[in-house]
Amino acid sequence: MYNRAKEFLALMKKARVAFEKIAGHGAGHVRFSYKDKKDKLVLVCNSGEIKQIVAKDGACDDGECISWEDSEFAGQVPLEAFYKYFDQIDRIEVSHPHVDKTWNSIEEFERWLNYVINKQP
């Protein structure tokens, strides 16, 4: 059976390692879009840990988010919302001074992370 929590934690560990290799630190924002939802979840990471999960809508600029209560995820705990909609992710975006990339599936994102992690320095 598919274990969302385990896969998610492994994915975030890979993201931290990839950010460290690219930028010299494990900080970054990863945005997740979902089928049938206009709002996105953004994982704000620093020092290899998820510091915050916020919601964004199409009107948000970089560095901005909407109130959780005004988002399509209102009434849910942020991490639980991420787990609940994990199977519905249809776009992942990383916007960082050293990388600006988009993927259309978790599998594509993981392949890229593995490539970066395994790439020789």
Image (spheres, rainbow, N blue to C red):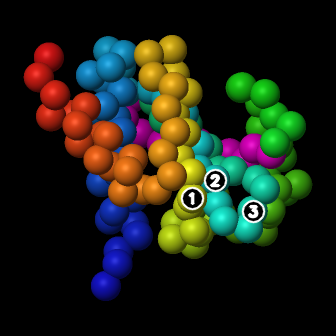
Q: Secondary structure at mark 1?
A: strand
Quarter holding residue 8: bottom left
Q: Which mark is residue 33?
A: 2
Q: Secondary structure at mark 2?
A: strand
Residue 48 among those drawn in magenta: yes
Q: Residues within 10 Å of mark 1 (few under 14, many from 20)?
A: some
Q: Is residue 20 visible?
A: yes
Q: Is residue 120 above or below residue 82?
A: above
Residue 119 picture location, percent across and down? 16, 28
Residue 91 among those drawn in magenta: no
| Nearest to N terminus: mark 3 or mark 1 | 3
Q: Secondary structure at mark 3?
A: loop
Q: Amino acid at mark 3?
A: Lys
Compare residues 91 and 41 and report the one nearer the observer: 91
Quarter holding residue 17: top left
Q: Is residue 38 left or right of residue 121?
A: right
Q: Amino acid at mark 1?
A: Asp
Q: Residue beneath label 1, please? A: 90
Extent of the magenta region: 47-57
What is the C-alpha distance between the residues marked 2 and 3? 7 Å
Residue at figure coordinates x 56%, y 51% from the top left: 91
Q: Mark 1 and mark 3 in contact (Cβ < 8 Å)?
A: no
Q: Is residue 108 left or right of residue 114?
A: right
Q: Residues within 10 Å of mark 2 (few under 14, many from 20)?
A: many
Identity of the residue furthest to the left in this view:
120
| Nearest to N terminus: mark 1 or mark 2 | 2
Q: Mark 3 and mark 2 in contact (Cβ < 8 Å)?
A: yes
Count numbered badges in the picture.
Answer: 3
